[in-house]
Amino acid sequence: MRRWSPGSRALALIVIAITTGAWTWTLPRGFPQPHVPPDNAMSASRVELGRHLFYDKRLSANATYACASCHRQELAFTDGRASAIGATGEHHPRSAMSLANVAYNASFTWSNAKIDRLEAQARVPMFNEHPIELGVRGHEPEVLDRLRADQRYVAMFANAFPTERAPITIANVTRAIASFERTLLSGRSPYDRVVADGDHDALSPAAWRGMKLFFSNRAHCSECHAGFNFSGPVHYLGGPNAKAAFHDTGLNGRFRAPTLRNVAVTAPYMHDGRFTTLDAVIDHYIAREKLTIASDEKRDLIAFLESLTDEELLHDARFSDPWAIHGQTLPIRGQTLPIRGQTWPTRPMNLPTHLW
């Protein structure tokens, strides 16, 4: 099979291109096409507008905070804090969740199944008052005036929403941000190179042992962290009507299983960030008698979890801050290879028997 690599085998990019209308998806091999609501069709102009808004602090009431303040690319779009902090310094009771592969979520936030669209989720940090996050509620006119005063935004909104006479609206802000977030696809980790590309050297011996343990009936890890996104039910084009699943892990409540992709860079862990290391998370499950493993097996399991890190996601220029490099034209779509898609396994069943 042909391979394309921007400098190293460790950063191999294996994608499949699917064109839908004015947009071409560049999907990691085996990933299904994300579902997109009919009232917010994908387009390059809408995605690029959303990227600018995602990183723009003018979108908060006091112009000090952006979406990216709580969702940093180098941390797989988390913030490294136990609990998120809003524009006024108020702490959120929950940890900021990763946005990697958020396009496939059956629901958003830690525990609210009713928020099942990215467009609706984008309104939560904008308008939430308890606690205040971006603090837009009551300040909508001045926030929109800031955008209208920027001629770059005047042109970008017109290109993104060409049929509207006055396109700079809160509704279109959320549509653009949601469009950008749908492009934050993560499927280029060492694990993916094993399953999608047959590169059996991508994992260390310890990670191989940890993968066997993760998918085993003894550990049960993959029961909650299931599917290609290691997060349980996923929503995609042509797929079943996935419903969000919530789990009681002994932490006073039922919460959605977050994706384990890039988990090695998204500490601290759990809904309230109470655990600072993967070691501590596993110890919690051992203490709750949900997991029985030896110390060497714990090291193997952590090695496998570390193999889920997608270094390209953390450094991909398409997802970076456009204001930091203003004036440079960045690609919306990456280089693609004409390869055939496949159904992604919930466990690597296509591996040779002697390797499994």
Image (cartoon, grey):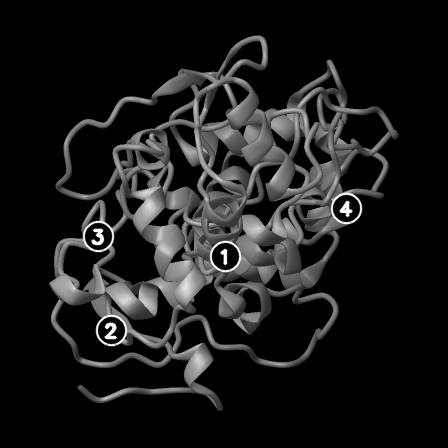
The amino acid on which the numbered mark 3 sits, given as a three-letter code, is Pro
Q: Nearer the viewer, residue 323 or 105?
A: 105
- The outermost residue toward the top is 252
Q: Is residue 312 above or below residue 218?
A: below
Asked if one can make out residue 76 in the rendered structure from this viewpoint, the answer is no
Q: Nearer the viewer, residue 333 or 288?
A: 288
Number of the front mark, 2 or 4: 2
Q: Mark 1: which secondary structure? A: helix
Contact between marks 4 and 1 (CB within 8 A): the answer is: no
Q: Position of residue 66 (x, y in %)?
A: 72, 45
Query: Left of 244 or right of it: where is 110?
Result: right
Picture quarter with the C terminus: bottom left
Task: Tell whether 96 sits left or right of 342.
Answer: right
Whether residue 150 is visible to the viewer of this picture, yes or no, is yes
How crowded pointer 2 is (Cα within 10 Å; few <14, some 14-19, many 20+) is rated as some
Q: Which mark is residue 58?
A: 4
Please tell me which of labels 3 and 1 falls first in the chain: 3
Pointer 2 residue: 197
Q: Are marks 3 and 4 in contact (CB under 8 Å)?
A: no
Q: Which residue is mark 1?
A: 303
